Image (cartoon, rainbow, N blue to C red):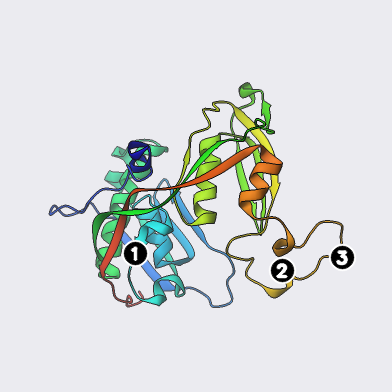
């Protein structure tokens, strides 16, 4: 169990004394206060962030989950910025093609932007935390396995409605970890691609009073639904079991608001 828990954070890397590779150009500006939502994306030429928080940027740069980021002032979750970075022409040509390896190189350069523009200094620790194990319920899985030749797709999650389309159970574990703000480890041994839909009371609400108001339809309003723990058993035939385990975390030692450019 401990090994599996630690693998949640396997992509986190402790800072080194060597200077991180950087982008040729980086722009950090406060977002339009009327903007909604947020976008964190990897492009061939760099990283683009719209209406993003510093906490979300750290999550992106270190391939972490927000529950792994500890410390820092409150504004790292409320102040929003637009960030645009650009690789040098040489780096753009010589880095690996679009995909995980190129994204790893972009993450390293994003860390340098955070260190320079936000004066971000961090260190890594391993702490004992609550961890959930995702297992098959006693009556078996209720999810629909689909033809793998169609290719994988993904999961959408909004206000307590989660829909999976040709997705792996490991992806479900990732989405659940964000919802529950604790690591979720897939121990189902389900290896196929699945379609599913689940409605539940979101752990963090939906962000507006209207979203949680009584519904005029036959579907229960978000906060009137069953908890995610009950819903996943009744609707998907899976179960979340809690335990304790070591989780690698990012501890913020120093951070400052950036000067816009």
Mark 1 surroundings within 10 Å by alpha-carbon count, few (fewer than 14), some (14 through 19), many (20 or more): some
Distance from disc 2 to disc 1, alpha carbons, whole Å, reads 29 Å
Number of the label disc, if any, that sits on residue 245: none
Left or right: 38 with respect to 110? right
Q: Which secondary structure, mark 2?
A: helix
x then y, percent, for residue 195: 68, 35
Q: Nearer the viewer, residue 38 or 201?
A: 201
Which one is earlier in the sequence, the residue at label 3 or at label 1? 1
Q: Nearer the viewer, residue 211 or 245?
A: 245
Which one is earlier in the sequence, the residue at label 2 or at label 1? 1
Left or right: 75 with respect to 155? left
Quarter-wise, where is residue 218 in the image?
bottom right
Distance from disc 3 to disc 2, alpha carbons, whole Å, reads 12 Å
Q: Residue furthest front?
A: 138
Is residue 234 depicted above or below 75 in this figure? above
Q: Which quadrant of the rendered structure holds the N terminus?
A: top left
Mark 3 surroundings within 10 Å by alpha-carbon count, few (fewer than 14), some (14 through 19), many (20 or more): few
Residue 39 shows in this picture? yes
Q: Which quadrant of the rendered structure holds the C terminus?
A: bottom left
User: How many discs mark residues in the rendered view?
Assistant: 3
Number of the label disc, if any, that sits on residue 212: 2
x then y, percent, for residue 59: 39, 56
x then y, percent, for residue 124: 24, 55
Q: Which residue is mark 3?
A: 216
Q: Which secondary structure, mark 3?
A: loop
Q: In percent of the image, x 50 and y 54: which residue is there?
A: 178
Q: Which residue is mark 1?
A: 70
Distance from disc 3 to disc 1, alpha carbons, whole Å, reads 41 Å
Callouts 3 and 1 close, C-beta under 8 Å: no
């Amino acid at each position: 169990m401990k090994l599996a828990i630690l693998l949640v954070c396997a992509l986190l890397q402790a800072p080194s004394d060597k200077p991180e590779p950087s982008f040729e150009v980086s722009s950090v500006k406060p977002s339009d206060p009327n903007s909604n939502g947020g976008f964190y994306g990897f492009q061939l030429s760099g990283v683009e962030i719209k209406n993003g928080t510093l906490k979300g940027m750290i999550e992106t740069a270190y391939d972490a989950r927000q529950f792994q980021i500890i410390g820092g002032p409150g504004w790292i979750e409320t102040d929003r910025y637009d960030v645009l970075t650009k690789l040098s022409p040489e780096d753009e040509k010589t880095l690996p093609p679009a995909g995980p390896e190129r994204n790893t190189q972009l993450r390293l350069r994003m860390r340098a932007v955070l260190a320079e523009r936000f004066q971000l200094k961090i260190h890594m620790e391993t702490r004992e935390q609550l961890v959930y194990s995702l297992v098959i319920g006693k009556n078996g899985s209720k999810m629909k396995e689909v033809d793998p030749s169609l290719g994988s797709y993904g999961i959408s999650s909004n206000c307590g409605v989660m829909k999976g389309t040709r997705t792996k159970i490991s992806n479900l574990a990732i989405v659940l970890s964000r919802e529950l703000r604790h690591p979720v480890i897939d121990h189902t041994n389900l290896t196929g691609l699945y379609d599913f839909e689940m409605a539940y009371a979101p752990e963090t609400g939906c962000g507006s009073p209207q979203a949680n108001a009584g519904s005029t339809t036959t579907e229960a309003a978000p906060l009137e639904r069953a908890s995610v723990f009950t819903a996943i058993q009744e609707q998907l035939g899976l179960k979340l079991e809690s335990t304790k385990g070591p989780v690698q975390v990012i501890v913020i030692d120093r951070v400052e608001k950036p000067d816009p450019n």
